[in-house]
Image: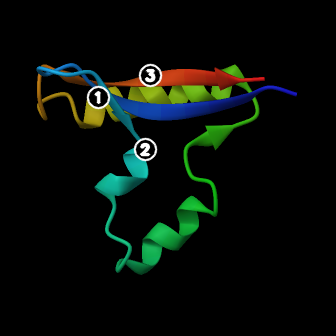
């Protein structure tokens, strides 16, 4: 079964990938709702919806940062 992960991609000077969960403070109680494996989805449709939302929300963060879907078999 495939798993789809959302990752933050930064292309400024070097190419880096990291989990968007780092954008959320672990001290905020609502972050517990992200679950044990946040930004992991069983269908590509779910992942695409979240990817689109993150790209809209953080559009002004940097022109070098966007969110991508990574597929794991």
Give neighbour class at mark 3: few <14, some 14-19, many 20+ (Cα, 10 Å). Answer: many
Mark 1 highlights which residue?
A: 56
For the residues labelled 2 and 1, the Cα–Cα distance comes to 17 Å
Q: Identify the element where label 3 is drawn.
A: strand
Q: Quadrant of residue 23?
A: bottom left
Query: Which residue is identified by label 2?
Result: 19
Tag 2 near tag 1, CB within 8 Å: no
- Neighbours of disc 2 within 10 Å: few (<14), some (14-19), many (20+): some
State which quarter of the image contains the N terminus: top right
Residue at the image point whose x is 35% and y is 80% from the top: 27
Q: Quadrant of the C terminus?
A: top right
Q: Position of residue 11 (x, y in %)?
A: 21, 19
Q: Measure the C-alpha gap from mark 3 to mark 1.
A: 13 Å
Label 1 packing within 10 angstroms: few (<14), some (14-19), many (20+): few
Looking at the image, the residue that sits furthest to the right is 1
Residue 3 lies in quadrant: top right
Q: Quadrant of residue 44?
A: top right
First in sequence, mark 2 or 3: give its number.
2
Q: Kindly identify which residue carries mark 3.
A: 68
Compared with 12, 24 (above or below) is below
| SS state under label 2 | loop
**Alpha carbons under labels 2 and 3: distance apart:** 10 Å
Q: Earlier in the sequence, mark 3 or mark 1?
A: 1
């Amino acid at each position: 079964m495939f798993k789809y992960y959302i990752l933050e991609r930064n292309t400024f000077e070097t190419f880096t990938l990291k989990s968007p969960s780092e954008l959320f403070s672990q001290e905020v109680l609502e972050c517990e709702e992200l679950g044990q494996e946040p930004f992991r989805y069983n269908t590509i449709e779910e992942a695409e919806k979240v990817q689109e939302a993150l790209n809209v929300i953080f559009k002004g963060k940097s022109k070098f940062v966007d969110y991508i879907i990574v597929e794991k078999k």
